[in-house]
């Protein structure tokens, strides 16, 4: 897979003594650091044509096309911090350590990698609090362009770097003698931040068991949920360390939302009794104090680690659906690319029809027009185009797949470790009948995000086409366990019904295909499977009715003949033995239901 590489000036920074500062005054330190980033650091990075790659909790990473701009930004940030922290007691002052290096980097949408980044991080660790360290390469490039008094402190052995690195340091005293940059002063009282979309804190789950030693299990649920929710695209999840400061405190969700700058608060409890455990969870809107979602989970405790994984996975998947719906429902006068992505995702919670697909495609196209480089918009649009082909609800499958292929190529080139993009690559390959190539893409998606339920079911389809029919239903059952109220669960029932149909377990097939019809009544291929199953059980009137409904929903001539259906992507695939099973069951049933050969 191709990678994006470029030469960049890398600036790495952290807060000296961050753990001590947080231990002394966690809320105050968090608010002051956030204000410094918003009012000094981010504006300075933008002023010097840089890009904030990511915030790291106690610091940040940025890249610049110009090494001179990177060094000037680093020094001006440190000089600005002197003024902003001037009135703070010495032991409570926030001081950055900054390292700057020049090197080749591998670029992803939300991160950069490579030895150039590693060296910048080591330089940061060697810098004094309030000072800046640069590499010899950076010193050579800036030459006489900047008049800062860097001191040569010689070659240093740097961890995980083969050769010693020559290092130059700008001391805090030298920075203090420079003119103050033009920045806003730190506010005496930090203003409440505007809460980002999809922002949430997972409060420590309460242990309601009689045994206080069971707290470890409640804490494990909290920590795993914090990790799993952070995998939701564009989410902003407060760290575990900050969340745990609210343990055993009265819960005022509006105040917590203001203090942490989040829109949602997740709280819950764990009660263990004998061999049973019950977990309650509820999602609260921090702006209105309204309950958005709540659920209860009961299970046995034969394997606590598996149970913990299953519970956190189910909650994370349910919250992913709920948060997307909540954010899409918020009105905005000036929607941006993310707004359109969220709206498109919310549309897909409706039953799939040609109109639903068109509406979602238009919204994702709007997102892409506003931000042509958005990996999320590229991936979502490719996914819905491939999905429309797989559902048999497009009149232009070839055009859809060409566009989807091009979009997902761009998305994965920019972000090769984005789990959803690998899932979409699997979808495109599956729609192209390249199911064996699709299997490792779905497996990669699950390796990157163990709770991606759609990858379980799509992997199941490909296992079916590859002839591993006995591996299919366990994969689908895992998806159902993780997301038992998923909007797409009708498609999962459909897959189980298809497996039973191909195994000539017609009665079982009808049970599951009827469940699929109830959950998603507008998918024509699903109705055609049920028509075949009814016909095989000699229920000819019901079979004819289902086939007529499939034709009506499809709106074209896909179900006009066996030959046309076989030729359409999404109708049937597989190795010869699986094709033989389709022939002996699905197509035999459709013939009995009245579908002509030609």
Image (cartoon, helix red, strand yellow):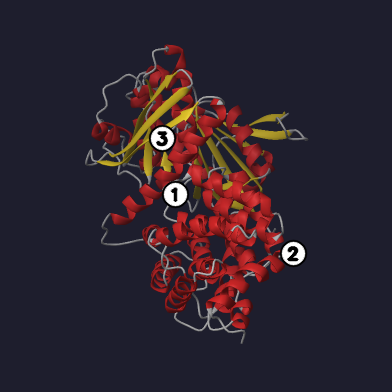
- Location of residue 534 in the rendering, given as x and y in whole percent from the top left corner: 51, 67
For residue 261, what is the image quadrant?
Answer: top left
Residue to which mark 1 is pinned: 234
Within 10 Å of disc 3 (Cα), the crowding (few <14, some 14-19, many 20+) is: some
Which residue position is annotated with label 2? Answer: 577
Q: Position of residue 293 (x, y in %)?
A: 32, 42
**In the image, residue 577 lies at what x, y percent?**
74, 64
Q: Residue at x 34, y 24 (%)?
A: 246
Element class at badge 1: loop
Quadrant of res 113: top right
Checking the image for residue 238, the label placed there is 3
Q: Say whether residue 231 is visible.
A: no
Q: Specify few, some or many for label 1: CA neighbours under 10 Å numbering under 14, 14-19, or 20 or more.
A: few
- Camera-side residue of 151 and 408: 408
Nearer to the camera, 163 or 369: 369
For the point 47% across and 34% down, which residue is it?
A: 311
Quadrant (top left/top right/bottom left/bottom right) for the N terminus: bottom right
Q: Earlier in the sequence, mark 2 or mark 3?
A: 3
Of residues 121 and 397, the one drawn nearer to the viewer in this rendering? 397
Q: Residue furthest right?
A: 162
Q: Tag on residue 460? A: none
Foreground label between 2 and 1: 2
- Judged from the image, the secondary structure of the residue bearing numbered disc 3 is loop
Q: Earlier in the sequence, mark 2 or mark 1?
A: 1
Quadrant housing the C terminus: bottom right
Q: CA distance from mark 2 to mark 3?
A: 51 Å
- Where 300 falls versus 546 (above or below)? above
């Amino acid at each position: 897979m191709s990678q994006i590489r470029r030469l960049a000036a890398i600036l790495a920074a952290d807060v000296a003594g961050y753990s001590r500062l947080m231990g002394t005054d966690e809320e105050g330190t968090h608010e002051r650091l956030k204000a410094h980033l918003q009012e000094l650091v981010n504006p300075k990075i933008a002023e010097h044509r840089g890009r904030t790659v990511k915030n790291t909790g106690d610091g940040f990473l940025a890249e610049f096309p110009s090494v001179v701009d990177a060094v000037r930004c680093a020094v001006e940030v440190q000089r600005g911090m002197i003024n902003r922290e001037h009135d703070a007691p010495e032991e409570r002052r926030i001081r950055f350590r900054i390292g700057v290096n020049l090197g080749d980097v591998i670029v992803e949408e939300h991160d950069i990698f490579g030895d150039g980044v590693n060296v910048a991080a080591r330089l940061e660790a060697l810098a004094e609090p309030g000072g800046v360290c640069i590499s010899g390469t950076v010193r050579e490039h800036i030459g006489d362009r900047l008049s800062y008094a860097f001191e040569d402190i010689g070659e240093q052995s740097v961890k995980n770097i083969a050769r010693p690195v020559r290092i130059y340091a700008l001391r805090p005293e030298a920075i203090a003698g420079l003119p103050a940059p033009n920045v806003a002063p730190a506010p005496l009282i930090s203003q409440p931040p505007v809460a980002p979309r999809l922002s949430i804190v997972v409060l420590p789950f309460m242990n309601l068991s009689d045994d206080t030693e069971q707290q470890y299990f409640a804490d494990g649920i909290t920590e795993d949920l914090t990790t799993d929710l952070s995998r939701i695209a564009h989410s902003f999840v407060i760290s575990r360390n900050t969340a745990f400061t609210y343990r055993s405190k009265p819960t005022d969700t509006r105040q917590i939302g203001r203090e942490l700058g989040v829109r949602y608060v997740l709280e819950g409890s764990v009660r263990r009794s004998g061999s049973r455990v019950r977990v309650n969870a509820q999602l609260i809107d921090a702006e209105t104090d309204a309950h958005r979602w709540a659920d209860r989970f009961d299970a046995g405790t034969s394997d606590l680690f598996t149970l913990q994984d299953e519970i956190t996975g189910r909650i994370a998947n349910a919250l992913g659906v709920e948060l997307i719906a909540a954010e899409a429902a918020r009105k905005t006068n000036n929607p941006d690319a993310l707004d359109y992505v969220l709206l498109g995702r919310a549309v897909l919670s409706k039953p799939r029809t040609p109109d639903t697909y068109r509406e979602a495609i238009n919204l994702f196209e709007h997102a892409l027009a506003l931000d042509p480089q958005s990996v999320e918009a590229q991936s979502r649009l490719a996914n819905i185009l491939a999905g429309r082909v797989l559902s048999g609800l497009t009149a232009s499958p070839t055009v859809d797949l060409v566009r989807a292929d091009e979009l997902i190529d761009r998305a994965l080139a920019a972000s090769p470790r984005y789990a959803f993009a690998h899932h979409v690559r699997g979808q495109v390959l599956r729609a192209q009948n390249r199911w064996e190539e699709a299997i490792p893409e779905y497996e990669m998606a699950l390796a990157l995000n163990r709770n991606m339920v759609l990858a379980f079911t799509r992997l199941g389809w490909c296992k079916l086409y590859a002839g591993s029919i006995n591996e299919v239903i366990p994969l689908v059952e895992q998806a159902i366990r993780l997301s038992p109220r998923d909007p797409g669960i009708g498609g999962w029932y459909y897959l189980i019904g298809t497996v039973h149909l191909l195994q000539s377990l017609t009665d079982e097939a009808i049970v599951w295909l009827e469940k699929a019809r109830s959950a998603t009544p507008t998918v024509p291929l699903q109705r055609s499977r049920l028509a075949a199953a009814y016909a095989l059980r000699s229920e000819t009137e019901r079979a004819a009715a289902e086939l007529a409904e499939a034709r009506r929903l499809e709106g074209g001539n896909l179900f006009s003949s066996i030959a046309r259906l076989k030729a359409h992507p999404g109708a049937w695939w597989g190795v010869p033995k699986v094709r033989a099973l389709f022939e002996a069951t699905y197509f035999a049933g459709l013939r009995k239901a009245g579908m002509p050969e030609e």
